[in-house]
Image (spheres, rainbow, N blue to C red):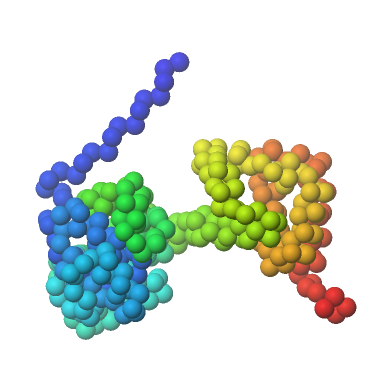
């Protein structure tokens, strides 16, 4: 049998498809904007202005974009050819409308937001004023430090753009070291929910696990969890549900019941999450033939009973 052909390398954008060297502005010096601007600077673009409100955001801008002046958002747009709108999702529509209504948007200006939730439709007010809209969402968690610039190498970006701007969007992502992944406008909320489910909830699960290990007497829970979680993540990315292991996938109802009892005693705030994830894990293990049906009944019975107890909350004589 012949080995599958290796994927062809992604062609570099042609010189005529690359954006010219641009003056870059950042509206919102959170964790994302300064890192992207610093990455674009490494590619030859020129950061010229950033808006920042809090002391923390000003320090972040000073660290990642030294000597770049901190100015009002309207002034950022006046100075920049490419503007990164890196504000929280809920603030983005109002910001775009305000910039468009006040005449801050210039025709031909590239206006890029980094929200995972929105496509380019949220930029329609600016587009009507002549702006060129792009949605470039880096699928990465950010720290607000220089390490973020390094992490962009090989990072996937969820990209939505009008057809006439697809080449420019792709070129910008590649210049930041990223890999463009095209997301349809209407699929953006689902795309973002998938990333939040995997990344944001993972942080919560890991933090809870470390707290429980400390209560169990483990001196270095991070050192214990690192190899285990690294292997679990690698297996899951390679094999999906086939990588499921542990007492739920095996149908060890007694072990799961013991887990819940210990969590109720030592960390009651974790019980609801444990039960929800255990039920989801059981459903997926059963659907993929990993959990034997004859064992699933007892396991699901334990989870259902404990779920009822959790929903009822503490009784009067338990307080």
Direction from residue 28 to residue 288 in the image, left or right: right
Expressed as whole percent of the image width and height from the top left, the position of residue 133 reads 25, 64
Expressed as whole percent of the image width and height from the top left, the position of residue 319 reads 82, 78
Expressed as whole percent of the image width and height from the top left, the position of residue 305 reads 82, 60
Where is the N terminus found, in terms of image quarters? top left
**Please, is residue 176 above or below residue 61 in the view?**
above
Toward the right, the furthest residue is: 317
**Please, is residue 247 above or below residue 149 in the view?**
above
Count of numbered labels shown in the rendering: 0
The one nearer the camera, 226 or 251, is 226
Residue 84 is at least partly visible in this image: no
Residue 206 is at least partly visible in this image: yes
Expressed as whole percent of the image width and height from the top left, the position of residue 247 reads 73, 45
Toward the top, the furthest residue is: 1
Residue name at image x 60 percent, y 39 percent: 243
Toward the front, the furthest residue is: 219
Residue name at image x 18 percent, y 81 percent: 103
Residue 86, quarter of the rendered image: bottom left
Residue name at image x 30 percent, y 65 percent: 33
Residue name at image x 38 percent, y 76 percent: 91
């Amino acid at each position: 049998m012949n080995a599958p052909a290796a994927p062809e390398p992604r062609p570099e954008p042609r010189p005529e498809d690359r954006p010219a060297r641009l003056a870059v502005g950042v509206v919102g010096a959170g964790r994302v904007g300064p890192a992207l601007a610093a990455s674009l600077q490494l590619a030859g673009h020129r950061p010229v202005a950033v808006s920042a409100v809090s002391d923390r955001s000003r320090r972040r801008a000073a660290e990642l974009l030294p000597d770049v002046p901190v100015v009002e958002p309207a002034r950022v747009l006046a100075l920049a050819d490419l503007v990164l709108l890196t504000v929280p999702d809920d603030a983005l529509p109002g910001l775009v409308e305000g910039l468009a209504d006040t005449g801050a948007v210039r025709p031909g200006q590239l206006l890029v937001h980094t929200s995972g939730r929105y496509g380019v439709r949220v930029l329609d007010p600016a587009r009507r004023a002549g702006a060129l809209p792009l949605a470039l969402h880096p699928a990465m968690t950010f720290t607000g430090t220089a390490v973020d610039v390094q992490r962009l190498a090989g990072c996937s970006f969820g990209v939505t753009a009008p057809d006439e701007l697809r080449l420019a969007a792709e070129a910008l992502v590649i210049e930041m070291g990223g890999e463009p992944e095209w997301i349809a406008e209407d699929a953006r909320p689902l795309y973002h929910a998938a990333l939040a489910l995997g990344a944001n909830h993972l942080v919560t699960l890991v933090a809870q696990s470390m707290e429980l290990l400390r209560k169990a007497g483990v001196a270095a829970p991070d050192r214990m969890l690192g190899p285990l979680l690294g292997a679990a993540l690698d297996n899951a990315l390679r094999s999906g549900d086939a990588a499921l292991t542990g007492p739920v996938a095996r149908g060890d109802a007694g072990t799961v019941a013991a887990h819940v009892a210990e969590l109720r005693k030592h960390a009651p705030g974790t019980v609801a999450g444990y039960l929800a994830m255990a039920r989801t894990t059981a459903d997926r293990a059963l659907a993929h033939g990993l959990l034997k049906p004859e064992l699933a009944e007892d396991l699901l019975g334990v989870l259902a009973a404990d779920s009822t107890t959790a929903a009822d909350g503490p009784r009067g004589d338990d307080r």
